[in-house]
Image (spheres, rainbow, N blue to C red):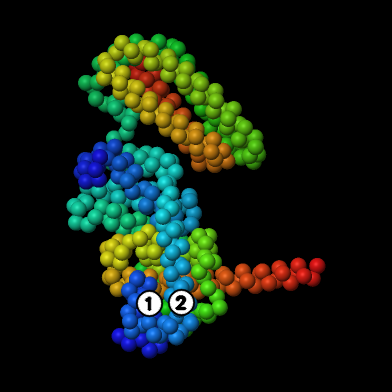
Amino acid sequence: MPEAEAIRLAQQGSAPAFERLYRLHNRRVYSLCLRMVSNTAEAEDLTQEAFLQLFRKIATFRGESAFSTWLHRLAVNVVLMRLRKKSGTEASLDEMTEPDEESGGPRRDFGGPDLRLSGSIDRVNLQRAVDQLPPGYKSVFVLHDVQGYEHNEIAKIMECSIGNSKSQLHKARMRLRELLHEALRSKAREDRKAASEGGED
Amino acid sequence: MAVNNCKDFLKQLETWTGGEHPADAQPHLRSCANCRSLVQDIDAIRAEARSWGALETEPHERVWTSLRAQLEQEGLIRPTETKLVPTTAPSQDSWLSGFFGRIPRPALAGAYLSVLVALGFALSGPVTKQTNEARWLEGTQVATSPLSARLNSVEQTAIPASRDLNPAVTASLHQNLAIVDNYILLCEKSVQEEPQNEVARDYLYEAYQQKAYLLAQIGERGENVQ
């Protein structure tokens, strides 16, 4: 069943059409949620919530935007709402960034040429660094660099300007770089400590 | 725009990492080890992110099961059971009367009662056995095996009796039982894969409960007709 037909039938309450739409998009939505929260149970819960909101509103879908964009907008909003609840704030997307990076110019911390990330990043430490990003940065980074959306699509999903999306992505990458460098330095310190302790034995 | 220092280059970083390499930025990059390092790091982050993005995982089947139940509860989609057991439409009482009239009701009622007793025993298990995981896991297997067998036994009593009925009714019955059976299979598979997952066990008992409920509806209708 093609997506357009499934949407039309789902608007009439057809169970197989709902399931078809779910099967078409569940991997992408779940992956987005999982990368945003790093917890399978919570990601499942958020996926269910995103689809539930979608199906509750499906009768109002008129096809002005792509169905997947609409669904991703709902999913991102569901995730951001959860993250806001967790942090106990009602901050807007713009406020969920770091004040020093919002107000100031480019950070001076470029990182020295002695520490290279190339060849030392793996999925585990990247996920760990992404987990530490403010929600706004995290959303744009996951959508753009991980899931491959373009800035114009992200602008529609997150209801922001293309410039805002680019700016958030730049800040997200710079912050990730800092976090990954910190992790590398920390690991190097631990290795040195272990080596010196081993030498004392 | 001329790139004379790191701050200027930073403004062009997005363009640079996007694949465009403006000629006026290249002299600075050649001479600045920090900016070269920055570009290499961002490229490394993007490459790892891309490979991460290529791995998309499907959510567990329980997400759809739970979502579907919620949609049915909210009336957004039609529940599967209503096709088989309408409770208000008088026009369908006639086929129900015919259907239940042919099932050996005492046997069905007895079997259903035993299913409920077994189900009650199984459902009460987690509360008392959570303190001892090994005993609980063993208890799950012990409790579900006879439960599954009894449900099958009840089904086997009902199915032969439905053969002489209206083919549409029989088809509907088989379709609904097949849906519940598939659900049970999925849940049993989940429990086998993750025997310590309490959510998976809850879904399994819920699946048995659905089948028991389906058979109970048949039993109740049968007794009412009688």
* Residue B13: mark in rendering: 1
Q: Quadrant of the C terminus of chain A?
A: bottom right
Chain under disc 2: B
Could you say which quadrant of the image residue A157 lies in?
bottom left
Q: Is residue B142 above or below residue B160?
A: below
Tell me, yes or no, whether the two marked residues, 2 and 1, touch with CB atoms within 8 Å: yes
Residue at position x 38%, y 89% in the image: B4
Instruction: Describe residue B93's horizontal placement relative to residue A111 as left or right.
Output: left
Q: Are marks 2 and 1 on the same chain?
A: yes
Kindly tell me whether residue A131 is visible in this rendering: no
Q: Position of residue A151 (x, y in %)?
A: 30, 67
Query: Residue A179, image x and y in percent?
Result: 51, 71
What secondary structure is found at the residue carrying circle 2?
helix
Residue lying furthest bottom: B4
Q: Amino acid at mark 2?
A: Leu
User: Given the image, on which type of amino acid does mark 1 rest?
Assistant: Leu
Q: Which mark is residue B65?
A: none
Quadrant containing the N terminus of chain A is top left
Residue B225 at x, y = what percent?
32, 14
Q: Is residue A42 above or below residue B131?
A: below
The image's mark for residue B38 is 2
Give the image location of residue B57, x and y in percent.
43, 49
Up/down of A142 relative to A196, above or below: above
At x 29%, y 53%, the residue is: A68
Q: Residue furthest right?
A: A201
**CA distance for labels 2 and 1:** 9 Å
In percent of the image, x 36 and y 12: which residue is there? B161
Q: Could you say which quadrant of the image residue A156 lies in?
A: bottom left
Q: Quadrant of residue A174?
A: bottom left
**Residue B86, can we see it?**
yes
Q: Which chain hosts label 1?
A: B
Of mark 2 and mark 1, the one earlier in the sequence is 1
